[in-house]
Image (tube, rainbow, N blue to C red):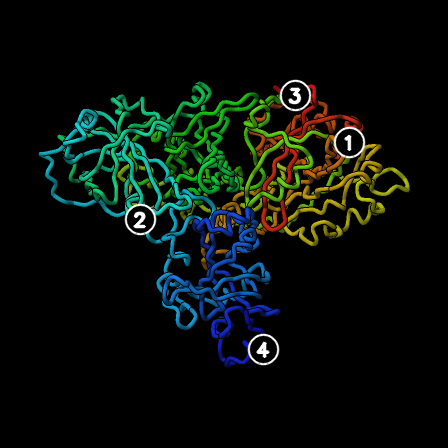
């Protein structure tokens, strides 16, 4: 097929923009070596068709991507060639950056008149932060460009996928969040006259005859709401394959209600817990026994679980009416929503897998990560989740919350320190050798400051007690203890490593060293995976801390003596909007807040900051881990040489320190010989900027939330370069692990817990040890932990003292627990979570 060159494009009018020249070519394929400069505005995902080509090429995943680009004057929606999907998975192609399109093709739909689109086949990355978008005021206001003769302007202008077989987009990072304008937001309840003289009760539905049964209207209240479930598969002819479960009740008991397909975009976000529904034209079906259900014993109502109510868009078309609260008389006898809030002090007494509701003040918010679902049916999918610490004043320990997306992305992404967080239907998880934690269920709902108003729980006694407690707090005291982001994994590993291996269902899979490279390459952006590897630690380097004093930016003003104000939307009958900013009369100077917060930061990293890095005493020897000549003590103290990893190229952006410099090191006696026999050395073991926890600052809250959240599918003017923001942090131990068969070596960063203010210290089993390198690796912390309130007290060993004990590792067979997380591009975070001696392992 004929291809257009750069010369063909330059024949167009010089007044035309880059996209106009590209779309005006008469050729169906275009190749421009220099590339056409455009900015990426949106990346949208949807289920692909299972074509013959996809079945033959397993490298293709199950989804397509549409990419919207702009040259600053026009915008165009393009199809991304499926061979480039991995660039989205690895966060190389992302919104808010500039690219140069070098190869593209115009593809016409041979089965539809006047339909087609441009397909991007190759491109070059241009700039990390778009220069084109800096000149655009309103991206949505830019006109849409298409090729002459094409009539599918509707798909190009709207949220409709370019592949006409699909009607809507999925969320970019999971399949559970609503995505697109067709998802109707919450609307006020209707004030209509209802004929409630002829209604039926839930108890009557279980005994009705299906052959002659005609449903009478139902009048019910919503008690629980599940997250969305997307069940789309190849070959399925359903435009919106969604379902959502609700538990509804009337005076006779409770029953499940299922919202199906097209009704989900129309009604899911409008049906809230506590709302009263008037239902017509519903159907009754036998309950699906394998689904999860909320625990509702505290409602003390009869549960009808043999059948469930189905609301369908057609055959028949169900009719839903949300009744205004003003129109609900007490004579209807509808039950109120009941909760089972527990305090942190009561958590220890709850049984495993029991359900509870919690409220707390958020102190730590972890980055959003993803984990691949183990579902065997349908296309592959990921869950998104984050770890949160919240306190309620009843205990010195926080709630440790593992929160999965609950189909309300605006709340999930908005969780930040100083929020009042409510989580319902959380499940208790007890683990050996660690504190219990709470994980969300399919029925969990989350609410943060700004979303509490009107929720049924605002009058609960334990919620009111929590609000009273927060009034005793001073926000500047609380703020200096808040943290965001960084490497965090829970639960902590038990004393004894034990797992079944016969059926492959182990929670921490034991993998062969030769499979590590495949595991790393299979990771997608922010995907987390924990695995175990047998081998020996053959080299350790201590990489010096690079404390950046410029990290202490001016901090936000806040109250000195005033209490932490209760979220107005949590106070019954409160009419003002949510606002966490203290009045001007209660503010301190920015310089004073800066001193307070920097003191807290130094306290949490006091050990690594105090440690002096000294010249290695082996006269005339180089660094055995690097093969480099050892630098002088002056060069170690005064400068850091930036040196790219030879296997990765110059990709060390985002790392806080180069692992090849400013180091103390040890290596085993046999490593020099063994390294010659190693077939592959995986060198992703450095510490990344995203691996470090940062203090939370109110004036940086927007940037910090972008840093810890997943990038949006559509660019907005508020989007910043927060994903790559620098973070000063402690030193760490850079370890090299040699597989048990001496074939594969892998680098991993070991970042021991040194402060009780570190979020990883919560629930950590702190048995005293001798601070040898092996004991630190076995326990995960230095003993004793530094108290952030008194950073000058206690004497922790210097890194060189720890490395002086490394000979213990010589010829020691160990089991290493590794945490892997893809950080974007070619960067993979590899953290050494814990080491086990074989005497501490029990394999069934």
Q: Which residue is mark 4?
A: 7
Of the image marks 4 and 2, the number of the one nearer the N terminus: 4
Which numbered mark, 3 or 4, is in the foreground of this view?
4
Distance between the alpha carbons at the discs numbered 4 and 1: 66 Å
Query: Residue 587's mark?
Result: none
Q: Which residue is mark 1?
A: 801
Quadrant in the picture for the N terminus: bottom right
Which numbered mark, 1 or 3, is in the foreground of this view?
3
Of the image marks 1 and 2, the number of the one nearer the N terminus: 2
Quadrant in the picture for the C terminus: top right
Asked if residue 477 shows in the view, the reply is no
Q: Position of residue 181 (x, y in %)?
A: 34, 54
Occupied quadrant, residue 627: top right
Q: Is residue 197 left or right of residue 173?
A: left
Q: Position of residue 11 (x, y in %)?
A: 54, 80
Of the image marks 1 and 3, the number of the one nearer the N terminus: 1
């Amino acid at each position: 097929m004929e291809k257009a060159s750069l010369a063909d494009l330059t024949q167009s009018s010089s007044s035309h923009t880059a996209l106009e020249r590209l779309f005006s070519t008469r050729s169906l394929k275009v190749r421009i070596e220099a590339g056409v400069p455009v900015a990426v505005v949106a990346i949208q995902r949807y289920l692909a068709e299972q074509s013959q080509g996809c079945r033959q090429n397993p490298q293709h995943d199950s989804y397509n991507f549409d990419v919207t680009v702009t040259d600053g004057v026009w915008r165009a929606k393009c199809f991304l060639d499926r061979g480039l999907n991995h660039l989205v998975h690895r966060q190389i192609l992302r919104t808010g950056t500039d690219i140069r399109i070098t190869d593209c093709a115009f593809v016409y739909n041979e089965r539809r008149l006047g339909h087609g689109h441009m397909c991007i086949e190759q491109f070059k990355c241009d700039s990390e932060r778009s220069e084109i978008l800096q000149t655009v005021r309103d991206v949505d206001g830019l006109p849409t460009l298409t090729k002459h003769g094409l009539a599918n302007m509707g798909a190009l202008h709207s949220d409709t996928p370019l592949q006409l077989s699909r009607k809507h987009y999925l969320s970019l990072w999971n399949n559970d969040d609503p995505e697109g304008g067709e998802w109707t937001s919450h609307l006020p309840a209707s004030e209509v006259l209802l004929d409630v003289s002829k209604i039926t009760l839930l108890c009557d539905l279980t005994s009705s005859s299906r052959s002659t049964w005609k449903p009478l209207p139902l009048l019910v209240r919503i008690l629980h709401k599940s997250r969305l479930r997307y069940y789309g598969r190849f070959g399925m002819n359903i435009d919106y394959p969604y379902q959502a479960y609700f538990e509804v009740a009337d005076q006779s008991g409770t029953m499940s209600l299922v919202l199906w397909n097209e009704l989900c975009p129309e009604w899911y976000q409008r049906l809230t817990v506590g709302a009263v529904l008037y239902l017509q034209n519903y159907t009754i079906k036998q309950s699906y026994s394998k689904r999860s259900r909320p625990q509702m014993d505290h409602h003390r109502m009869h549960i009808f679980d043999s059948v469930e109510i189905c609301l369908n868009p057609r055959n028949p078309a169900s009719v839903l009416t949300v009744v205004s609260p003003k129109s609900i008389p007490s004579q209807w006898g509808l039950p109120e929503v009941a909760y089972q809030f527990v305090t942190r002090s009561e958590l220890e007494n709850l049984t495993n897998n029991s359900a509870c509701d919690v409220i707390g003040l958020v102190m730590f918010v972890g980055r959003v990560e993803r984990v691949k679902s183990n579902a065997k049916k349908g296309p592959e999918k990921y869950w998104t989740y984050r770890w949160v610490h919240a306190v309620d004043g009843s205990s010195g320990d926080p709630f440790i919350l593992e929160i999965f997306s609950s189909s309300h992305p605006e709340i999930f992404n908005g969780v930040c320190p100083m929020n009042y967080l409510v989580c319902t239907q959380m499940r208790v998880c007890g683990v050996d050798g660690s504190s219990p934690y709470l994980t969300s269920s399919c029925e969990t709902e989350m609410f943060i400051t700004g979303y509490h108003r009107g929720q049924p729980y605002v009058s609960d006694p334990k919620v009111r007690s929590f609000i009273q407690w927060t009034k005793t707090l001073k926000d500047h005291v609380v703020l200096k203890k808040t943290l965001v982001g960084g490497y965090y994994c829970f639960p902590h590993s038990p004393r004894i490593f034990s797992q079944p291996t016969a059926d492959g269902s182990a929670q921490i899979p034991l993998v062969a060293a030769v499979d590590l490279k495949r595991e790393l390459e299979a990771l997608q952006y922010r995907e987390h995976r924990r695995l175990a590897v047998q081998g020996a630690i053959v080299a350790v380097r201590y990489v010096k801390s690079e404390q950046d004093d410029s990290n202490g930016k001016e901090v936000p003003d806040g109250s000195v003596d005033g209490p932490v104000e209760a979220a107005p939307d949590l106070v019954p009958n409160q009419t003002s909007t949510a606002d966490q900013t203290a009045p001007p009369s209660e503010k301190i100077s920015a310089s004073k807040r800066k001193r307070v917060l920097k003191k807290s930061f130094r306290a949490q990293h006091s050990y690594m900051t105090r440690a002096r890095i000294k010249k290695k005493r082996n006269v005339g020897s180089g660094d055995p881990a690097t093969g480099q000549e050892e630098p002088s003590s002056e060069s170690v103290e005064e400068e850091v040489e930036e040196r790219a990893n030879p296997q990765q190229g110059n990709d060390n952006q985002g790392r806080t320190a180069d692992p090849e410099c400013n180091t103390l090191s040890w290596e085993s006696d046999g490593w020099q010989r063994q390294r010659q026999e190693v077939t592959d050395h995986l060198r992703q073991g450095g510490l990344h900027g995203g691996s470090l926890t940062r203090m939370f600052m109110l004036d940086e809250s927007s940037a910090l939330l972008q840093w810890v959240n997943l990038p949006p599918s559509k660019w907005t003017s508020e989007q910043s370069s927060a994903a790559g923001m620098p973070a000063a942090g402690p030193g760490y131990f850079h370890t090299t692990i040699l597989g048990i068969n001496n074939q594969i070596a892998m680098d991993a960063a070991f970042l021991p817990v040194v402060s009780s203010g570190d979020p990883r210290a919560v629930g950590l089993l702190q048995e005293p040890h001798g601070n040898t390198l092996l004991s630190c690796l076995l326990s995960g912390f230095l003993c004793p932990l530094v108290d952030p309130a008194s950073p000058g007290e206690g004497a922790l060993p210097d890194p060189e003292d720890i490395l002086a004990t490394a000979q213990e590792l010589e010829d020691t067979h160990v089991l290493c627990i590794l945490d892997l997380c893809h950080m974007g591009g070619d960067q993979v975070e590899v953290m050494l979570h814990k080491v086990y001696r074989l005497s501490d392992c029990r394999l069934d």
